[in-house]
Image (cartoon, helix red, strand yellow):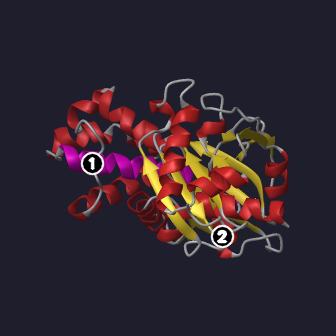
Amino acid sequence: MGTEAPPGEFVAVDWGSSRLRLRLLSGEPLPGGILGERTTDEGIGAVEAGRHEAVFLANLERLLGAAGRWEDFAATGGDVYFAGMITSTLGWVPTPYVTVPAGPSEVLAGRRVERIGRLRLHFLPGIRSADDILRGEEVETFGICSALGLGLDQAGATLLVLPGTHSKWIQVSAGRIQDFSTVLTGDLHAGLHRSTLLARTLPPEPAAVEGDLLGAFDRGVDLAKRDGGLTSLFKARSLPVLEGMAPRAASALLSGILIGGEILERIRGRSPLPTLVGGAARLGDLYLRAFKGLRTAAERVPERLSEYASAEGLRFLRAPDRA
């Protein structure tokens, strides 16, 4: 028999399209408040309809069992907070979007609370604008803002860039998401490697841009600045033909064109804002490199914070519930 879980403990679940991550949290600021963690490849895309509850419970029992908490957590009615695609129409418990501007109070008001036995399951909504949607990134945003002290007393606005398959550009002020845009840069990069004429001079999958490929990436950013992103795409075909550029270098070039084009599209004609770049280590670093190549100021969200931003966001959102 494990010891009874302290009242501040809860489980944070980040359940996206390709990954399921559960963390047992103490309620204290992260990373020190992480008491246990379990990550699997059982994203919603890999789980058959009707199997979400079974998959969740199996992973919850493994997470809490390793910490000696399972029996008491289940028996005393522990709290579990969910973020990500699991709350979409493709997931387990669809939860409607709340509309910008939106902060923690609006997100909490829009949640759905379900029960399995005595467990309390909190499914958080995404955020929408008139023509765009967030599902999971809003929780990461709150986590980053909480950790960096960008709260209700924040002076002015900050632009948070979350690179990924679908990059998100999120404007935050006074602890609330005011507006955002989605750019399909990563999706487009992968698709160009597989389903277009460019694929003939590219490797089957995007190359990891590092080492001697960084020069090709920088050249791609320069091309996007000179000619525009869309106009520059064909250079991933023409330069291999004309210069003998290797496939992996052409892939890095294409990455620079796409990321450089994305940044230029989002900053041109707009008043500059303090900009933070999150995301996984390698990709976030490439975005920061492109910002620098375009002579545009941006700072990197600390890598460790990017890793646990969703869990920190759920911890931050849960805090008013306990007050």
| Main secondary structure along the magenta-highlighted residues | helix
Quarter holding the N terminus is: bottom right
Residue at image position (69%, 38%) is 132
Instruction: Measure the alpha-carbon separation of dots 1 and 2.
Output: 31 Å
> Where is residue 219 drawn, in percent x and y?
33, 57
**What amino acid is at disc 1?**
Ala
Give the side of residue 251 with respect to residue 43, left or right. left
Residue 320: x %, y % from top left: 82, 63
Instruction: Answer few, some or many: residues within 10 Å of disc 1's Cα (few below 14, many 20 plus, some between 14 and 19).
Output: some
Q: Do the residues labelled 1 and 2 touch (CB within 8 Å)?
A: no
Mark 1 element type: loop
Q: Where is residue 23 in the image (x, y as percent from the top left)?
A: 55, 58
Residue 274: image tag: 2
According to the picture, the residue beneath numbered tag 1 turns out to be: 207
* Residue 118 in view here: yes
Q: Nearer the viewer, mark 1 or mark 2?
A: 1
In the image, the segment drawn in magenta is 247-270
Specify whether residue 57 is painted magenta. Answer: no
> Residue drawn at (45%, 59%), measured in percent from left and top?
280
Numbered tag placed on residue 291 in the rendering: none
Mark yes or no: residue 306 visible. Answer: no
User: Going 73% across and 42% down the picture, which residue do you hit?
Assistant: 125
* 293 horizontally vs 86: left or right: left
Sequence order check, earlier mark of 1 and 2: 1
Q: Which residue is drawn at 49% across and 59% down?
A: 37
